Image (tube, rainbow, N blue to C red):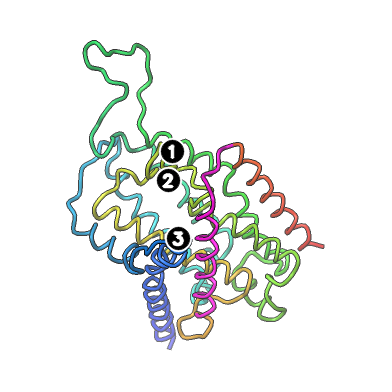
Amino acid sequence: MFSNTLINSILAVILTVLVCFIISTLLPGIERKYIHARIQQRIGPMVIAPGIMAPLKFIFKENVEISSPVPKLYKILPILCFIVVLCVFIALTPEAYSIPALSSLVAIVGFLKVEEICYVLMGALSKSVMSVRMPFPDRAKGAAHENAPLSFVEDISSRRSLRMITYGSFPLYLALFAPITAARSIFLQDIVAYQQANGPFLFTVAGGIAAIVFFIGYMIILNEYPFSIIKAKSDVIEGPYMEYAAKYRAIVYLTRGFFMFVLGCVFSVLFIGVPPIIFSMGILVNIAVALIFVFMMGIMSAFSPVFTNRQLLPTILGATLLGVLSIVLGLL
């Protein structure tokens, strides 16, 4: 009987992952078609283009060999990002609540931090420009520059990513820990149980403030305007993703859509008390929250420029102070 229960739990998690992953492939298209395109008064791509057709196109392209001091690690980083996002989603499912090491906020934060570190490594390990090693400045005869440093565009992205890890993600993590003040536990099972018994944390003063902070952190960790400092189009082009092509870029596209959905599920679990369960109507809440966040992010990013450091630091500091306020209010 124990084995049957275990098999049923595994099948439920696999089915939940598959259904939610399929839905997540539509989120980038919804953002571009029904938000960005409408705001910019253009037709926009098909809904399935960014999240489904684009990855399929890249899968059938030929891989290129980039110049990197650790090429195998560089290539595996997009796969690692997807695995990390998958682990976060699995941790949110009720079937994982019996594994304390996985179903706690400490584990969620740890996984998200690994995802952030991958951006730093992506930028630091790429030593080429469009897959061709091109040292800068030019070393041709008659164009020598003595004592000039050699750099690559991804180096800029790597330094910016490190900066965002250092202080940029504070708002998100403060918002994640805010529900602990109500449930008095770091375990997802206790947080969900408390909200099912006492109502969503979102509808409290502390929860409302933390929800605003969470949304700011949501945009920061997704590197979306106005917080897309690591991939500013003017100088870094695509940031840490620049040299990823073919199958690796397909994984990048799929991971982004899935990450958008998973972050919506994180909010559903921590602020509403509804985990992703495929055999429950609660999954509709997860989908609705994911869509609401996509629409809010799309509207915000469509009207926002890229923040400079002078704009970024005060915004993050303000969001951090709001996160601290929500925790303090929750403890009162």
**Mark 2 Cα within 10 Å, few/some/many (few <14, many 20+)?**
many
User: At x 41% / y 59%, what residue is drawn?
Assistant: 256
The quarter of the picture where residue 85 lies is bottom left
Decide which of 251, 194 is in the foreground and name it.
Answer: 251
Which sits earlier in the primary sequence, circle 2 or circle 3?
Answer: 3
**Mark 3 Cα within 10 Å, few/some/many (few <14, many 20+)?**
many
Q: Is residue 104 left or right of residue 251?
A: right
User: At x 53% / y 43%, what residue is drawn?
Assistant: 164
* Residue position marked by numbered label 1 in the rendering: 158
Q: Quadrant of the C terminus?
A: bottom right
Decide which of 12, 50 is in the foreground and name it.
Answer: 50
**Decide: marks 2, 1 in contact (CB < 8 A)?**
yes
Q: Is residue 331 left or right of residue 1?
A: right
Label 3: state its secondary structure. helix
The quarter of the picture where residue 51 lies is bottom left
User: Residue 36 shows which numbered tag?
Assistant: 3
